[in-house]
Structures are given as C-alpha cells and as structure tokens.
Amino acid sequence: MAGRKHDNAGFELSPLYARFLRAYIQHGNAGRAAKEAGCKCQTPESFRVRGSQMLKRLNGPLHDLMGAAGLASADILRTIAQGINAKAAHVAYDKFGGLHVYKSPDWQARARFADMAIRLMGGYPKQQMELPFAVADGKLVITAEFEATAPLDSGEAA
C-alpha cells in the first residue's frame, strides 16, 4: 500500500476511510479526523501525519467519494460555508474589570476550510508549480519572464 498512487475511480472506500472522510468534512482537521476515525496512533504528531497520509491516499476529487461515506452535498456545503466564515472569540478585560468578548476572523480555520473546498473539487495540481526564482551559487536568481511597460529608471513605471 505505501508508496502507491490511487485514483478515486477504482478506490473502494473502507469503513475507516468513510469515518475519516465524514470527520474531515465536519471540521477540516485531518489529524483530528484520523483520531476520530479510529486510527491507532500514539502521539498527536502521529495522528497529524496519518491524517495527511489518508488525504493523500484519497488522491483526486473527494466529491466522488462522498456518497460512499454517507455524506450529502447540502451538509458539505453548509459545513464549508460555516468554516470559511469562521470567527474566533477573544476575551478582554477593561480597566474596571469588566469582561468583553469580541470576535474576529479565524484565519487558520478559514484556510483549512478553503483547502477542503479545493480538495473536494480536485483543485490541487498533480505536478509541482514552477517557482519564479531559483538559487544559484548562493544567490537568488529570478527566472520568471515578464514585460516592463517602461524602463525602470525612466520614472514612468507604475
């Protein structure tokens, strides 16, 4: 099993993977989903690694596996919408000891759910994206090609 790539087309969803997928869709945390699915790991780090491995094993658009995991599209969309709009509660005390609770965007949760939405649609490319720079002889070299509308020293460039 290890080291082999699988497409979802011929992949039978085992009970473990169905539980994992249901938990992952619920909160977007692969490590926590691996723990809730019943993976036998000893440390939080090993649950995180196992969750990541399970996501990679599902290789491809996850929406193809939703029915096998017993998930409905409306539930998934509702969960993603709530996650993308997640807010974190913060507690502060004023100088008189009064308690104030305020909410701000929870960027970490929002990023997890945006990542989940991309995975559901199979949006991550199989190949690694080409970077616009490289390191040669210990120096950063820009490799991207671009057009300048005016010479940089003319003062006309925006």
Image (cartoon, rainbow, N blue to C red):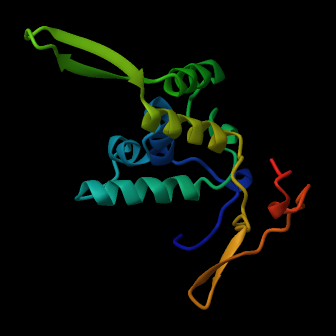
Measured as percent of width and height from the top left, residue 140 is found at 62, 78
In the displayed structure image, the side of residue 52 where residue 147 appears, left or right = right
Q: How many labels does the image show?
A: 0
Measured as percent of width and height from the top left, residue 34 is found at 39, 48
Looking at the image, can residue 13 be seen?
Answer: yes
Measured as percent of width and height from the top left, residue 83 is found at 50, 26
Looking at the image, can residue 23 be seen?
Answer: no
**Which residue in the rendered view is the most extreme toward the bottom?**
137
* Residue sitting nearer the eye, 96 or 16: 96
In the displayed structure image, the side of residue 48 where residue 92 appears, left or right = left
Vertical order, 32 against 155 (above or below):
above
* Residue sitting nearer the eye, 71 or 104: 104
**Which residue in the rendered view is the most extreme toward the left?**
97
| Point 51% across, 20% down: residue | 82
Q: In which quarter of the image is residue 103?
A: top left
Measured as percent of width and height from the top left, residue 38 is found at 33, 46
| Point 46% across, 30% down: residue | 26
Vertical order, 117 against 124 (above or below):
above
Vertical order, 32 against 88 (above or below):
below
| Point 90% across, 57% down: residue | 150
